[in-house]
Amino acid sequence: MKLPGVREFSWREVATEARLLLIGIPVFLWTMIPIYHMFLFAISPKEDAFSGKLWPDHPTLHNFEIVFKQQHYFLRDFYVQFWNSTVIAVSVGVLTLFIATAAAFSISRLKVPGGRTVLNLALFTYFIPAAFLAVPMYRTMGNYGLLNNHWSLILAMVTIASPYAIWVLKQASDKLPVELDEAAVMDGATTLQIFRLVYLPLMMPSLVAIGTYAVLLAWNEYLYAFLLLSNDREITLPVALGNFLAADDSPWELLMTTGFIYALPPAAVYYAFRRYMVGGLTAGAVKS
Amino acid sequence: MAITLSGDQSIPAPPLSSRLTPAQVWGIILLAPYLLVFLAFVVYPVCYGLWLARAPENYVALYNDPIFARAAVNTLIFLVIGINIKMLIALLLSGFFAQQRTWIKWLSVIFILPWAVPSIPTILSVRFMFNPEWGVINHLIFSFTGDDGPNWLNDPTVALSMAIGVHIWKSLPFWTLILITGRLAISHDLFEAAEVDGASWWQKFRYITWPSMQTLYVTCTLLSMIWTLGDFNSVYLLTGGGPADLTHVLSTLGIRYLRLDQLSLAMASIVCAMPFVLPLVYFMMKRLSR
């Protein structure tokens, strides 16, 4: 009497599990194939990569060696470009955090007159597709004399990153109780002390999320980077990767190896801060 | 100190500045960096761009450019078909990922990868997979059928569909994540009650899940449409607008004009998109700034 009941239960379990796998396996394949293909190229000698093998006959790290020793025409400035990408991403992160935190504190906690309007303007910028702003931005940077200067890309990315940053930080600040500020004022704290000693520590999780967001946005940016920077020693890694395509006989295995190296830091940063990212960004991204 | 600063900061009339509290003065100072960025890198470029695009000849030239018409149609296809397919899949997958299973937890960690890694290497990786001579897809087709595979990216319809596919690959995780958050916010009691009443999964979806998620779903769809207008990478890195400039979308077309040194045409093509973009933006702002 008992046994069939147990069996029936587990059969249903198996059927549900099978149906879930029927979704899970295609999802896994869909997600991983382009990434696996990139990895495959990175560990394949050129002959294997170009013959459509699913696993190379002789997996090798030789491609990485070429990249790290800059032993190819397209890779001669690899380290400089990696450094450019790093400097620009970190600068964008720091500047965005500074600008957005100050603005969010001002709008949400100090209730500055006109704060609402500024927030709406920022939101408006957030919704303008970045590729549309790129055209006038390119010309503007030319007018400012900043083309081919890292500052052009840094400032452009700060412009793109800060509206969202301000908005998310403003939402997070609104949740902090007003009593905190009032108590601090009672104790004779100045505005700056409240900012430094009360506001910043409480906002830490959101600040980590926004900092990561801005850094990743800048590191991953291609369009603005390739419009604003062109000199070989000024460009960032993604632009260098794009330049590989200029040749007819592009060394694809090296392109994929460099791309793999380029994709590792953002993936690592993302997973390291995933806890903050998912909470901080999805909460802000869509308030239904 | 604070009061004197406010004098030369932004408030010209002395009576007004004396009415401001020190906190408000600091408020203005702290808001100033963003305002400067906004004026220098949003207001000025936008006004300058509109001024460049002022001449009616630009629009005549666009009207006579077959590439522009094609790009407009492609953009519409990209938005209307591509985004709706993407959001529908995201909605389905959000139900899948909301299941409590260890392996599904792990899969969701992997699933986010396309969104976490930069698009250039992955899109180029897809591009090479479909290379007619050397790509792995045509190698597989050859080894199974003995025939040469098609020249994928040489057919504008296939190429555009693949660009849409690449776009979906890249941004599906993000929207799925958002919809999972929405789905998990639904009270579990509702589902339990439905279970007791013997509701089928479709009835549960139809009468519980969908009513509580439809606002979020529509918001996400519109937001995704606006952002996809600015998706330059999926098309540019996969097809480069080719073959024969038949797969351009508005964002790549603007850059194409820019590179051909036709800045006013580039701006005009963007201005043409504004009647579609601005209502969407207005609607989104209404929705989000409550």
Image (cartoon, coloured by chain):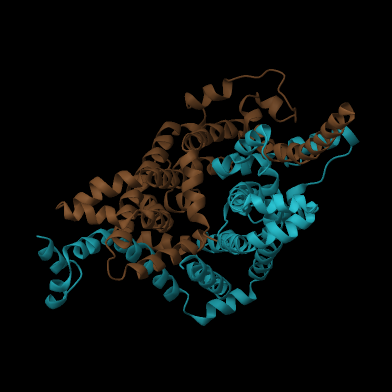
Q: Residue at x 22, y 65 (%)?
A: B24
Residue at x 53% of width, y 40% of height: A241
- In the image shown, does B114 or A143 lie closer to the viewer? B114
Residue A281 in picture, x, y percent from top left: 48, 49
- The quadrant of the image that shows the N terminus of chain A is top right
* Residue A159 position in % (x across, y down): 39, 57
Which quadrant would residue B8 be assigned to in this image?
A: bottom left
The residue lying furthest to the bottom in this view is B56
Toward which corner of the image does residue A144 lie, by quadrant? Answer: bottom left
Against B129, residue A53 (above or below) is above
Q: Where is residue B179 shown, x and y percent of the image?
A: 62, 52
Q: Is residue B163 above or below residue A248?
A: below
Locate the C terminus of chain A by quadrant: bottom right
On screen, residue A44 versus residue B259, left or right, reads right
Residue at the far front in the pictured view: A1
Q: Which chain is cyan?
A: B
Residue placed most toward the observer, A6 or A262: A6
Q: How many marks?
A: 0
Residue A190 appears at what percent x and percent y? 16, 54
Question: Could you tell me if residue A220 is visible in this image?
Answer: no
Residue at 22%, 53% (x, y): give it. A183
Q: Is there any visible trace of residue A143 in the rendered image?
A: yes
- Shade of chain A as shown in the rendered figure: brown
